[in-house]
Amino acid sequence: MAPRGASRLVDELGTLLLGAPLPLSVRCWDGSETVVEGAPTLVVRHRRALRRLVHAPGELGLARAYVSGDLDIEGDLYTVLSLPDQLPARPDLHVDRRALARLGGRLLGAGVLGPPPAPPPEEARVRGTRHSVQRDRQAVSHHYDVGNEFYRLLLGPSLVYSCAYFPEPTATLEQAQEAKLDLVCRKLGLEPGMRLLDVGCGWGSFALHAAARYGVSVTAVTISAAQVALARERVADAGLAGRVDVRLQDYREVDDGPFDAIASVGMAEHVGLAQLPAYAARLHALLAPGGRLLNHAIARGPAAGPDRPDPGSFLTRYVFPDGELQPLATHVRVLEEAGFEVCDVEALRRHYALTCRAWVRNLEQRWDEAVRLSSPGRARVWRLYLAGSALAFEGRRTGVNQVLAVKPGGDSRLPLRRPDWSRTANRDRADDGDSTSS
Amino acid sequence: MAPRGASRLVDELGTLLLGAPLPLSVRCWDGSETVVEGAPTLVVRHRRALRRLVHAPGELGLARAYVSGDLDIEGDLYTVLSLPDQLPARPDLHVDRRALARLGGRLLGAGVLGPPPAPPPEEARVRGTRHSVQRDRQAVSHHYDVGNEFYRLLLGPSLVYSCAYFPEPTATLEQAQEAKLDLVCRKLGLEPGMRLLDVGCGWGSFALHAAARYGVSVTAVTISAAQVALARERVADAGLAGRVDVRLQDYREVDDGPFDAIASVGMAEHVGLAQLPAYAARLHALLAPGGRLLNHAIARGPAAGPDRPDPGSFLTRYVFPDGELQPLATHVRVLEEAGFEVCDVEALRRHYALTCRAWVRNLEQRWDEAVRLSSPGRARVWRLYLAGSALAFEGRRTGVNQVLAVKPGGDSRLPLRRPDWSRTANRDRADDGDSTSS
């Protein structure tokens, strides 16, 4: 009886948490199975998976079970992650705790109850005041200091960890990242000799592109020690040590302005709503009059509903501690209130979905290597969050926008028409998408 | 003594109101003059001009004096209108009423005091609840029902009364308006057979362009009776009566959706902050899933400071009663909260400065005809407000933005990259600025 019992219990537990029959096959630690034709299989490798769910019903319990390996998925991960959208309730909502208690007795019979298991070691522990310089460093370190070779595998040779810009959906990730880097350079109107500040420079790919192709000198800052190490190595290899200065520095600590242009790509998500005005004011103070700021950030989509940072969410516990997403309107308001003139907004939501799917492919194609370069839990965290992110962009729960803003008081040299921006520098780039044939 | 006295008094009054010596030559009703070398001349044609200022110190008094003709300007109007920005205080702020009272005695001596003169007939009188359908009609009628031939003179043959899109600063207004109409069509991805709603259609120029060039059928609504009359005439002349339906209808009264696309160009400025959410919700309800909205509206610039609608302002009393400008961030927020996905924002501030200056030129070049087609006061109102608007756009006190938004739930057919938008329709338009050579 036990085998049937185990998978039946999982079925009932799933139904309870999802608010509908579990549309998945289930295979349990004891070999028991329930089959749903054509559906992916939920593999419960250990009783502990259920125990984690009982002690943390919903998203956190599921995340801990999956990250620890007590729970696994066979078949298409996207199909499984899309289930909540097709079900009456999201797994993290409206759990009937009394029904759960009634089920508890039978779970006890199945021997799955017991003390709460320790969370997997990949769970984040950040301390201090939210969005203080010290705590932001811990939060950033948690996500970015996990092995540069792991990121090389995930991101590919471009080593760009933000939304790419796909000429066509079929373009390679490398082509799309190259196009993105160049798009940002052109929006900023970079020209030889200009001083560029790159806030949240990652592994230095944008700084390298701007310095090598547009002849600017770049101050590139990040608070990830691992990123600084590899970025400096890459700058030296490129022979650009004289033109790219990579620093382990918080945006609040940069004080050697004015810069002619500022790029902030995929960094504002770490700033937090409370700090956004100070962030915008700091960038405004660091920019020369007439200088341009390109603020490229993920945003909450109109379908996302009200923002309530969930300390129990998988993203907060495992991926981006203290990460916060705001609607586009908030980014625009904060920039305007800091004194910027917002000149252009380009939404790249669909490009980020394509980007995330490309990263997931990189990870799945070299899974064993990825595990070796990080940890089984880490590889699972990145696979889960990136597949989930792809779906979030496709479902408009999140978007991503490039906001181009100018600091009044000087000549921004911004051409009257957007199609002409690509001609502000590198007039030989007639082959790129933004150039005109007129 | 009196002549010297009169112009000296004007000098002192000007100094008092401006908070600095009046940097203008002055010529008074009695022939008295004070000369400032190379400065434009303030012509006080009648004592009444001063009386208006005494009874309504600041902007309103100046406006009444100018509109009535009691006050005039010889020389460059832009120079005079730029003075406040170069002076410690704006004329509408911080009037020292006690110093004004002291001056009153001497003004009495000069025989300029007396009962408050009646405001010029061009001053607006709107009644009812702010932004009710009824009062909005009065407000719109005040500005737009002043003679179609006057507007033809002002706007030129394109008859487009919104920001143009200049391929180069030297392009003609006609070329720039044509480029703007086509830009909006391409952003909306118009294709033959689509149903387009044009909210605030003016004299029908955009509806005509969209129907003739893109083969859509257009429902064009305005609450200006004069606009409806001429728009219908132009539609009939173009033989497009079957494809363009011009209606005297408020946006709140349109109920025959869904439309495949909606254009709102230069209309949201009349909606008012309190009504903006209802406005966005109505457009959202009228749009088919996947349909695009192009919301083109003047915005308060970052340099504008906090919004406090001033019932005594020249713009409210003479130009746009109940007109309200919001920052770009507010427009984006309202659209997102209504359920739209904001896909693109293009700031056209400098284009509107060029547009206003072109309109002022049209007016000044055919001044006598303009006066005949409207009234001396009206011609002065439009000259003053358009010259002032050009300076406001140049000084970033106001901006203007095209916000492209999509209603989720269907395929927006929006190409991945902006340069490709121009290829969604009319593939033969390779000569336009937004098309690509790739």
Image (cartoon, coloured by chain):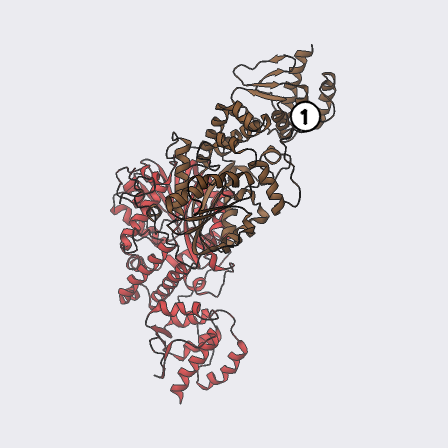
Chain colours: A red, B brown
Q: Is residue B111 above or below residue B395?
A: above
- Numbered-mark total: 1
Residue B147 placement (x, y as % from top left)? 55, 33
| Residue A277 seen in the current view | no
Q: Quadrant of the N terminus of chain A?
A: bottom left
Q: Please report the residue visible at 26 percent of the width from the left and 65 percent of the height from the top.
A: A365
Few, some or many residues within 10 Å of mark 1 (<14, 14–19, 20+): many
Q: Is residue B374 above or below residue A399?
A: above
Percent across and percent down for residue A414 are: 39, 36
Examine the image and state in which quarter residue A52 appears.
Answer: bottom left
- Asked whether A205 or B300 is in front, the reply is B300
Residue A366 in the image: above or below residue B261: below
Q: Chain of mark 1?
A: B
Describe the element under mark 1 as helix, strand or loop. helix
Residue A367, given in percent of the width and then of the height, sits at 28, 66
Q: Is residue B318 left or right of residue A13?
A: right
Left/right of residue B234 with respect to residue B142 in the rendered view: left
Q: Is residue A21 visible?
A: yes
Q: Is residue A52 left or right of residue B41?
A: left
Q: At which x and y percent is residue B22? A: 59, 20
Residue located beneath label 1 in the image: B52
Quarter of the picture holding the C terminus of chain A: top left
Frontmost residue, B340 versus A413: B340
Q: Residue at x 51, y 58 (%)?
A: A307
Residue sticking out furthest to the bottom? A1
Vertical position of residue B22 compared to residue B340: above or below: above
Q: Amino acid at mark 1?
A: Arg
| Outermost top residue | B1
